[in-house]
Image (tube, rainbow, N blue to C red):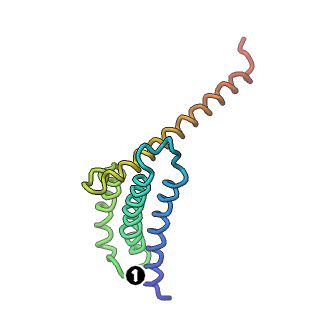
Amino acid sequence: MSEVHLYLWIEGAVMAGILATFLIQAFFLFTPDHVEHHPFRVRVGAIIQGVVVGGLVGLVLLPLRLSFLIPELPGPPSAVASTAVLPAFLLILVVRRGLLARAPLLGRYVRAYRQAALKRDIDIAHKRLVRLRLMDRKQRAEAPPEA
């Protein structure tokens, strides 16, 4: 297998892995309490978000990284790659800030997925706060009384 084929295989594997991670989250980690809309909408939103994030990582960040490490690979030369770092970073910020949720056709699905993800994050944060409070109470009960 040549280096180019290996390079393309790695890109595809990274993209597929990220997409699979988003889908697994949508199918198994979201409970019915998290999903306010129809579950199909949330799963389609997870697919869209996974494709976009996987594409950014697999098609933008990975080639930039590899162009610095292995100059013989096809893709942007190091000089071009170094100028593409800022736009790639800005693209990631756009995705992270949720601007994809304002897209005309895909927005409703991405919003449903992001809403379910935020509700899950809030649930996890509440559980962690309760656990920390219990640890504080236990520590205060075990501490010797001050005179």
Count up the numbered dots: 1
Q: Residue at x 40, y 73 (%)?
A: 68
Which residue in the structure is indicated by mark 1? Answer: 73
Q: Please, which residue is most extreme toward the left here? A: 104
Q: Residue furthest top?
A: 147
In the image, what residue occupies the spot 30% across and 66% down? 84
- Residue 48: quadrant of the picture: bottom left
In the image, residue 46 lies at what x, y percent? 42, 56
In the shown orientation, is residue 107 left or right of residue 61? left
Rendered view: 98 above or below 91? above
The residue positioned 27% from the left and 50% from the top of the image is 102
User: Helix, strand, or loop for circle 1?
Assistant: loop
Amino acid under label 1?
Answer: Leu
The residue at 48%/54% (across/down) is 26
Q: Quadrant of residue 136?
A: top right
Image quarter where the C terminus lies is top right
**Residue 10, x across and y down, in percent:** 47, 75
Judging depth in this view, the residue of 69 and 30 nearest the camera is 30
Instruction: Give how far across and how far down residue 104 sits, in percent.
Output: 24, 54
Task: Report whether 78 appears left or right of 21.
Answer: left
Residue 130, horizontal then vertical, whole percent: 59, 31
Determine whether 94 is above or below 120 in the image.
below
Front in this rendered view, residue 29 or 73? 29
Which class describes the residues within 10 Å of circle 1: few (<14), some (14-19), or many (20+)? some
- Whether residue 100 sits left or right of residue 26 in the image: it is left
